[in-house]
Amino acid sequence: MTSKKLVERKARIKKLDRALKKLFPDARIELNYKNPLQLLVAVQLSAQCTDKMVNKITEKLFKKYRTLDAYVRARPKEFEQDIKSSGFYRAKTKNILAAATMLKKDFGGRVPKTIGEMLRLPGVARKTATVVLKEAHGVVAGITVDTHVIRFVQRYDLSDFKDPVRIEKDLMQLLPKKEWGHFTHRVIHYGRYLAPARRYDTATDPLIKIYQKAAQKFRV
C-alpha cells in the first residue's frame, strides 16, 4: 500500500466505521454458545455455513456433547451425522475431534488464550482464532476477515488484495487497535441486513455517500 493510499484509506475507513457504529451500535457475534469450547466448535462449524444453521445444529449438539471428554470419546461416524447439515462434515468432524484431543492433551482441557497456541489446533486458521480469542477471552489478536469483510474491503477500496491474511494486515494498518474487535461484527451486520452481495437499492445505504464508487460493486 502506497503512502498516498494509506492516508486516503485511513480517512475513508474512519468515516465508514463511524457510519457503521450508528447503523449497528450493538453488533455482536450471532452464534449461540455458553463457554469457550462451545464457541470453538460453533466457529469451526460455521465455515461455509450460515450462523442460523449452525445454531440449529448446536442446539442439539451441545446437549449431546456437554464436556470436552464427550468430544474426545465421540465416534467420528456418529459425529458426522450430528453435524452433517453444516456441510463439509467429514473434514469438520476430523478437525473438531482432533482439536478436542489436543486441548485435553496439550492445553489442560482449556481453550488457549494466545494466537500462536490457537493456530496449533486442527482446523483453526486466523479467522477462527481471532474470533475465539476475542469472544471467549477478550483477547484482540487481529481482525477477523470473513467473506463479508472481503467483499466490504473490495467495494470500498480498502486493500489491493483478496487474500484474507493480506487484507487483515492492511486493515490493521488502517484501523486503531481499539476498533479491531468490533469492526468485523459491524461489517457482517452490514452485509447481512443492509448490503447483500446481490444488487439492492443503494439509495437506502448511507455508506455509499462516503464512497460512491461502491454503488457499482456488488459481487467481488
Image (tube, rainbow, N blue to C red):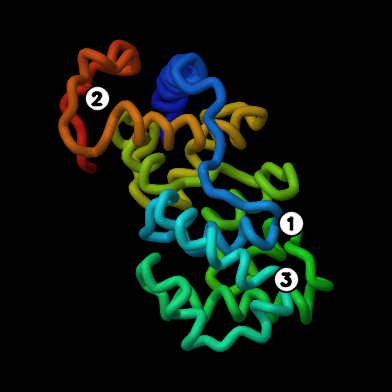
Residue hosting label 3: 67
- Foreground of the two, 168 or 41: 41
Could you tell me the amino acid type at mark 2? Ala
Tell me the crowding category of disc 3: few under 14, some 14 to 19, or many 20 or more residues within 10 angstroms, Cα based.
Answer: some
Residue 153: x percent and y percent?
A: 37, 35
Q: Which corner quadrant holds the N terminus?
A: top left
Tell me the crowding category of disc 2: few under 14, some 14 to 19, or many 20 or more residues within 10 angstroms, Cα based.
Answer: some
Residue hosting label 1: 114
Under circle 3, the secondary element is loop
| Left or right: 86 as drawn, with respect to 144 | left
Residues under numbered marks 2 and 1 in contact, where contact means CB atoms less than 8 Å apart: no
Could you tell me the amino acid type at mark 1? Thr
What residue appears at the point 68 percent right and 42 percent down from the top-left corner?
A: 140
Q: Which corner quadrant holds the C terminus?
A: top left
Residue hosting label 2: 214
Under circle 1, the secondary element is loop
Which quadrant holds residue 124? bottom right
Question: Is 86 above or below relative to 4?
Answer: below
